[in-house]
Image: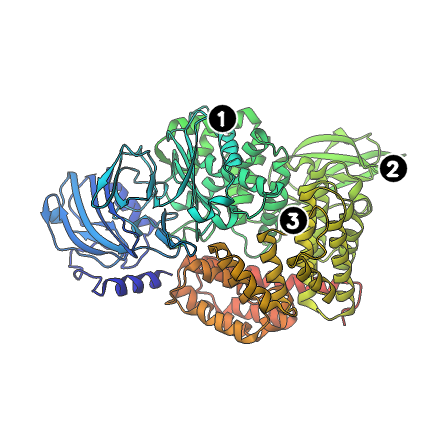
Amino acid sequence: MKSLISQAVALAFGTALVAGALPSYAATRPDNAWLAQADAEARAARVSNVAYVLDFTLTGKETFAATTTLRFDLKDAGEALTVDLDKAIIKSLTVNGKTVTPQYNNWFITLAAADLKAGRNEVVVSYERAHSTNGEGLHRMVDPVDGRVYTYSHFEPAAAHQMFALFDQPDLKATYEVSVTAPADWLVVSTTRESSVRDADGGKRWTFPATKKLSAYNFSLHAGPYKVWEDGSGKYPMRLFARQSVAAQIDPAPWFTYTKQGLAFFDDYFGIPYQFDKYDQLLVPDFLYGAMENAGAITFAEARFLHKDKMTTDQRHALASVIMHEMAHQWFGDLVTMKWWNGLWLNESFASFMGTLGTAESTEFRNAWQYFYSNAKTGAYRQDDSPGTHPIEVPVPTTANAFDNIDAITYAKGASTLKQLRHLLGEETFRQGVHDYLVKYQFKNARLDDFIGSLGEAAGRDLGPWTQQWLYQPGVNTIAAEYSCKAGKVEAFALRQTAPQAYPVLREQRVQVALFDASGKAVKLARNVPVTYQGAVTDVPALQGALCPDLVYPNYQDWGFVKVKLDERSFATARANVSKVADPLLRAMLWQSMWEGVRDGALPLNEFLQTALNNAPRETDYALLGNVLDKVRGGHAYLQRMAPQAAYTRKTAQALEDMAWQGVRSGTDANFKRRWLTAYIDLAGSREALARLAGLLAGRGVPQGVTVSQDVRWTIVRKLAERNAAGSAALLAAEQQRDKTDTGAAAALAASVVRPDPQVKNEWLGQIGDLQTKLPFARIRTAMEHLYPSSQAALAEQTAERRLAQLPELDKAAGPVFMRAYAGTLIPAGCTPHSVQRLADATTKYTALSAGARRALLAQHDEDRRCVAIRQALTVPLE
């Protein structure tokens, strides 16, 4: 998308972007859009005490004007210095009061050594620039409902220079003093609260006092005719912002409730009060991620948090957990920040860990760790057990690589590792170490060694070996219980730890080993022992003499990050009695053990699906039901890719449909009904089911207690389009007339793209591959995500060679934002030996891919190989 922005700016201004060729004194920094760590370190060694004065003129049009005043101390003036500014038209440049000709290459300005001086310097850059449309920099969106224009900034990992001139690296923290001229009906939001708003030039002039010291990616500016809600009931003033046209979909009460609960919890836990005076949260369109921790002005993706019906329990939990995640960043990330992007994992891991802890301990969601296990940790196991894994801590050579490793390893494995460390050290010791770290480095930058050192000092132990085992080595270990019984009692008991051949490290961690009795109506806990294990075998003498168990689970309550291999007796007990296990978290972990058995080829998929058919309807835990149904849908998708017309596939699909519809019709809890309905829509494929879905759109046959909201309607319309159901095109057109919102337009796009029409697929592949398209990236990403559902394996195969062949070209030209979406959705996998070989050949041929694209290719090859193995493990015919 970088080249797209460049061309858009050139067209907007109709002028050359380069003010002058770089002279001989140009810095040795490479002439491209990315900042290398070595260049950042060299600049940080010379520059300090940075302050920005920013002045923006926003009109709502496609471009904006601005002036940046940079003040900084320079250690020496012996060499040129670069200032980052992306794709701007520079109107004037002064350096220490002297007007100079900009030496500018579209990505950074080179300041001549002769114009600089040792000590305090001042650089003033006036420029114009096009707003971004890819979610970075200062993004602009025109609301299709009412024509209003909204803007917001997003700078992570290094996109602040798409909005203003600066040293765009995290270890040059600075203060930001801002003034904005904007239309009269706009609100302007930044890190601090405005000090004045006055009439100016037909609009309003907003002035903001200087911030505390922040890394550039934590500063933000948002402006538009937003609707605002305010709440002053907590310790800190809270506001919530959203577009006018979606305001009716917002219930501000839970936002303010969870925010107030979280701020009280984190103030207490960290022992340091919140530092940014006010707490603003904004729902914004076309957002690239779930949310962003801008200091004092957090942004959230509309697509994830706007709902056209009363929020379900699951949606409320998602809201609470993301609010807590971003709030934890206000301390760990904003107050104390990594020096370079290799430390980004620690920010995200810590926020994921602390966000879950805060959700569990300060909100209604006491089962937050169960959600974390099912929704996040299992994904980390999956990636860590694939060729797409990587260490938690990895080098980041340039800003182009900053997000290469933002994935399940960074978030969920990292968070699980911190959770494990908390159990290893003790909860209060861990908390004290975190407090000491935040106090010592507040408003500064720190490295991993600084954080680990604070924890080690609090614990009185050297954490160096632990750090090497967990943070610098990839791969997930497996533990299994090895025990013998005599006369009905345990004679000997040990834990055996194994490691994958590619990553043979054995780790130290603390777990709980639990024994269960399944002789009665329920599977009951009989014995539970905490164990710190390391090496290949660890004896557990505390379990000698216990009653011989029906089930052993050696990671009870999920303390450890480790795959569990159930012994044969325990595996049989789990399959036969999973619904009789009282603890929902343990049930979730047993389901995961069975699902890992499927993916590892140890449990036939048909037997897993039968277990699900027998047990899912009995599930009484709302969160766990969602996880089980996700696995059911995963199993159904495997069958669709393998052989959609096989007798077993059709029979099983019908059984799953029937189970889901019965779940919709039974019970009285609206949340459960919605969960079952979501599964039913996803599983629907028979004529009867598709006709029933069409009937729900028309208000026919709606079960009691079920609400067919606008969100549900769009899900149904998309499913009918995917299956090419009779009348689906007319239903799509009617729904477009019914819902003309921006979210409606995105849903209509998804329903259009998903149609099983080769011409549609080819046209959209052309749009996706055209980096000059004028479509916002949010729309391109929606197309990628819905182009090839699992039910259209044959259609996907028609373009498989084309998609794979253009991977290197796109990877080179499109940039990391685009490639994260493309590589995650459009690398072809057909669940056939031919497809597996095609991907194997690509991994051999395409060795020059970026780290992220290369990892996605390896992971997709592994997934395709597993799919073929799962097919081979079936004990029913698929011919």
Where is residue 548 shown, x and y percent of the image? Answer: 84, 35
- Per the model, the C-alpha gap separating discs 1 and 3 is 36 Å
Residue lying at 26% horizontally and 64% vertically, measured from the top left: 10
Q: Quadrant of residue 17?
A: bottom left
What is the number of the mark on residue 707? Answer: 3
Where is residue 109 shown, x and y percent of the image? Answer: 21, 53
Q: Is residue 256 above or below residue 248?
A: above
**Mark 3 residue type:** Thr
According to the image, label 2 marks what residue?
519
**Mark 1 residue type:** Ala
Cβ–Cβ below 8 Å for labels 1 and 3? no
Q: Quadrant of residue 577?
A: top right
- Residue closest to the eye, 477 or 682: 682
**Which label lies toward us, 1 or 3?**
3
Where is residue 735 shown, x and y percent of the image? Answer: 56, 61
Which numbered disc flags the more N-terminal residue, 1 or 3? 1
**Mark 2 residue type:** Ser
Q: Is residue 723 above or below residue 538?
A: below
Secondary structure beneath dot 2 equals loop
What is the number of the mark on residue 264? Answer: 1
Q: Quadrant of the N terminus?
A: bottom left
- Per the model, the C-alpha gap separating discs 2 and 1 is 46 Å
